[in-house]
Image (cartoon, rainbow, N blue to C red):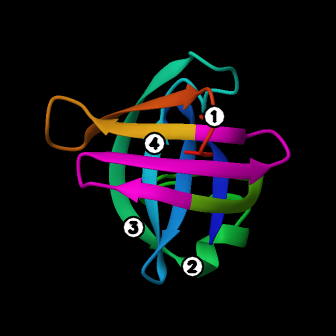
């Protein structure tokens, strides 16, 4: 399965983490960027799923449209889903910048999650 991380300069500069899931890109806005070092964590706000075609999108979303601003691809590659319990998602990213084991954990209910870069375990989980 694929992942893409967009750098999105909309009302605020942030990254969008997108993971392929059931024919769409499940998406989270990450205001302070995707962590690249073990132990780092970031708030990630789940947003609407995006179509698979969005995996290659780069350009400018016009003023007046949702998400208006410049969008570029910060990283992309393949990922392995390790576990999805509904409240926690474990996955491994294989990109140029984002590599290794990550976890998304539901935080405060609703659409808020915490995104962690974690040390990969012996069983590659």
| Image-based side of 25 in relation to 45, left or right | right
* Above-or-below relation of 90 to 105: below
* Above-or-below relation of 8 to 14: below
Label 1: how many residues lie within 10 Å, few (<14), some (14-19) or many (20+)?
few
As helix, strand or loop, the secondary structure at mark 2 comes to helix
- Decide: marks 2, 1 in contact (CB < 8 A)? no
Label 3: how many residues lie within 10 Å, few (<14), some (14-19) or many (20+)?
some
Q: What distance separates the C-alpha of mark 3 from that of mark 2?
A: 9 Å
Query: Which residues fall within the magenta stretch?
Result: 81-101
- Residue under circle 1? 120
Q: Nearer the viewer, mark 1 or mark 4?
A: 1
Q: What distance separates the C-alpha of mark 2 from that of mark 1?
A: 28 Å
Q: What distance separates the C-alpha of mark 3 from that of mark 4?
A: 11 Å
Residue 29 is marked as 4
Q: Earlier in the sequence, mark 2 or mark 4?
A: 4
Task: Pinpoint residue 36: horizontal percent, then vertical percent.
Answer: 70, 27
Which residue shows up at 39% across the image and 67% down it?
49
Q: What distance separates the C-alpha of mark 2 from that of mark 4?
A: 17 Å
- Decide: marks 3, 1 in contact (CB < 8 A)? no
- Residue under circle 2? 52
Q: Earlier in the sequence, mark 3 or mark 1?
A: 3
Say which quadrant the N terminus sits in: bottom right
* Above-or-below relation of 108 to 98: above
Task: Pinpoint residue 90: horizontal percent, then vertical percent.
Answer: 46, 47
As helix, strand or loop, the secondary structure at mark 3 comes to strand
- Is residue 85 a member of the stretch shown in magenta? yes
- Decide: marks 3, 4 in contact (CB < 8 A)? no
As helix, strand or loop, the secondary structure at mark 1 comes to loop
- Residue under circle 3? 49
Q: Find residue 122 and report its image quarter.
A: top right
């Amino acid at each position: 399965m694929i992942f893409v991380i967009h750098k999105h300069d909309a009302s605020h500069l942030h990254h969008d983490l997108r993971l392929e899931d059931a024919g769409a890109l499940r998406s989270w806005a990450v205001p302070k960027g995707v962590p690249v070092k073990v132990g780092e964590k970031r708030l990630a706000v789940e947003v609407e799923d995006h179509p698979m075609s969005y995996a290659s999108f780069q350009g400018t979303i016009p003023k007046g449209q949702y998400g208006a601003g410049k969008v570029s691809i910060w990283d992309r590659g393949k990922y392995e889903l390790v576990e999805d319990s509904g409240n926690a998602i474990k996955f491994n990213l294989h990109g140029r910048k984002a590599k290794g084991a990550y976890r998304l954990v539901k935080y405060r209910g609703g659409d808020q999650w915490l995104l962690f870069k974690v040390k990969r375990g012996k069983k590659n989980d």
